[in-house]
Amino acid sequence: MISTKLKKNDNVVVLSGADKGRRGKILFIDMKKGRVVVEGVNKKKKFVRPSQENPKGGIISLEYPINISKVMVFCDKCKKGVRVGVQLKDDNKIRVCRKCGKSFDK
Ligand SMILES: [Zn+2]
C-alpha cells in the first residue's frame, strides 16, 4: 500500500519512459500496487472477443498502468509537473502547487 496525493481525474505529466512529457487525466489509481492508468499513456493493442459493447471484437488500444512515481501533477501556471502540498482552507484540506500555490481542488 502506498500513499499518494494524486487523485482520479488529476491532470498529470509523465516523467520518464516512452511517453515522457505526455499529459493526461488519471483514470484509475491502484494504491496497492502503486500504479496509475493515465488517459492516452502507455497504450497497447489488445485483442478482444466480440461482446455487446463491441460486437465485432478485434483489436483495440487500451491504456496500461504505469508506476505512480513516473507521473506528477501538471500545474497550468508553472507549465510543468510539480510537487503537491496540502493547505488548510476553511477547515478543508486542499491540494496546492508547492511552487505557485495554485489549488488543484475546487
Ligand atoms: Zn504551480
Image (spheres, grey):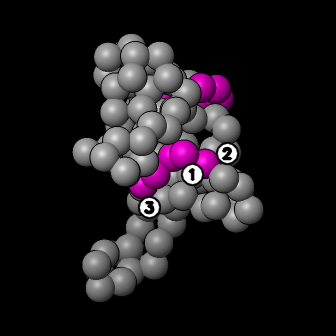
Disc 3 residue lies near ligand 1 with CB under 8 A: no
Neighbor class of circle 3 (other Cα within 10 Å; few <14, some 14-19, many 20+) is few
Q: Inspect the image, locate mark 1, and give the three-letter code of the amino acid beneath it.
A: Val
Which mark identifies residue 70? Answer: none
The image position of residue 24, as x and y in percent, is 39, 38
Instruction: Tell me if 99 is positioned left or right of 106 in this view.
Output: right
Front residue of 21 and 103 = 103
Who comes first in sequence, dot 2 or dot 3?
Answer: 3
Stretch of the chain drawn in magenta: 4-18
Q: In which quarter of the image is residue 22?
A: top left
Q: Which residue position holds label 1?
A: 36
Q: Which residue position holds label 3?
A: 59
The image position of residue 32, as x and y in percent, is 70, 64
Q: Can residue 39 be seen from the camera position used here? A: no
Any magenta on residue 9? yes
The image position of residue 39, as x and y in percent, is 40, 46
Q: Residue at x 29, y 85 (%)?
A: 52
Figure label count: 3
Instruction: Name the dominant secondary structure of the magenta segment.
Output: loop
Say what secondary structure mark 1 lies in. Answer: strand
Q: Quadrant of residue 29?
A: bottom right
Location of residue 25 with respect to 101 vertically, above or below? below
Dot 2 and dot 3 residues touching (CB under 8 Å):
no
Say what secondary structure mark 2 lies in. Answer: strand
Any magenta on residue 6? yes
Quarter holding the C terminus is top left
**Which is closer to the viewer, label 3 or label 1?**
1
**Which is closer to the viewer, label 2 or label 3?**
2
Who comes first in sequence, dot 3 or dot 1?
Answer: 1
Location of residue 88 with respect to 74 vertically, above or below? below
Which mark identifies residue 67? Answer: 2
Quarter holding the N terminus is bottom right
